Image: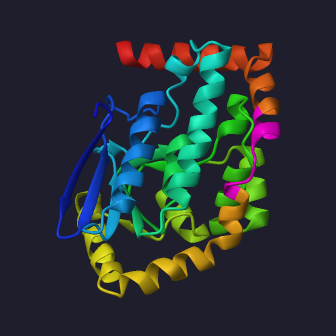
Amino acid sequence: MNTIQVSVQDHIAYITLNRGSSNAINGEMVSELSDMIKNLEADDQVGGVILTGKEGFFSAGLDLIELYTYNEEQIRQFWKDFLHMVSVLAGFKKPLISAISGHSPAGGCVLAICSDYRIMAEGKFIIGLNEVPVGIIVPDSIFHLYAFWLGQGKAYQSLLEGKLFRADEALSIGLVDEVVAPNVVLTTAQRKMKQYIGLDWTTWQQTKLNLRAQLLEKVRADQNATLEVMLKQWWAPSTRSILHTIIQNLQKKANV
């Protein structure tokens, strides 16, 4: 695997995002993460999964530099695969905890809100869905995930504004569940996971699926109509211009 690292200890699987300095999400990461979650769900020796990143970044979101170069077929397949990954993560029946080790905007936030519990590093780090200012239309399934934690009204306002939250703000609105020092994010996630897997696994998992039944129905719904609208806007001159400017800025920072 090129974009994630996986280890298992004491019935806990650890998935560490490991792609470049900021863990930007590309097609390969989407594929590897989807496949690994499916494998771990089928593994009877694994009680739960902790998803984490690296110091400073959980994930910076989609790799816009790479995605910008995709042709029509490639970008269509990427979004199909991405939405499938979201449904796999959200529908994972075992405990899934996000140990948010740093910045987690856009696609990074999407990964986090699929989980059952989110622990974020305190400090200057930000999290949230800021797709609208970038020119990307947010799919229905992702809005429903956001609203599952924030509530309809707050998710609605935050999405339309492309609002990014500091860790303390995210805690106050329920986007994350704990904010701790960066050096104890993972150990805090371990304690919470041990609490979960110390309970009867069948009871816990079925209760999770029951509580998420309506959400999963929305997340797994046919997204083709939304996808067509998204793709049309992706190729719109206004969106291409915004993306081009963002990419230029990212490349300048990389060269500093």
Q: Residue at x 37, y 81 (%)?
A: 201
Q: Position of residue 150 (x, y in %)?
A: 66, 66
Q: Does residue 73 sit above or below 196 in this rendering?
A: above
Q: Which residues are magenta?
A: 219-227
Q: Is residue 201 left or right of residue 75?
A: left
Q: Does residue 39 sit above or below 93 in this rendering?
A: above
Q: Does residue 147 sit above or below 53 in this rendering?
A: below
Q: Quadrant of residue 227?
A: top right
Q: Quadrant of residue 22?
A: top left
Q: Quadrant of residue 146?
A: bottom right
Q: Position of residue 178 (x, y in %)?
A: 42, 70
Which of the two residues, 108 or 96, is positioned nearer the viewer here? 96
Picture quarter with the N terminus: top left
Q: Is residue 211 left or right of residue 96?
A: right
Q: Residue at x 71, y 14 (%)?
A: 241
Q: Is residue 178 left or right of residue 90?
A: left
Q: Residue at x 66, y 25 (%)?
A: 76
Residue 224 belongs to the span the image colors magenta? yes
Q: Mark yes or no: residue 31 visible.
A: yes
Q: Is residue 56 left or right of residue 153?
A: left
Picture quarter with the C terminus: top left
Residue 159 belongs to the span the image colors magenta? no
Which of the two residues, 180 or 226, is positioned nearer the viewer here? 226
Indicate the colouring scheme. rainbow
Q: Residue at x 56, y 74 (%)?
A: 209
Q: Position of residue 234 (x, y in %)?
A: 73, 23
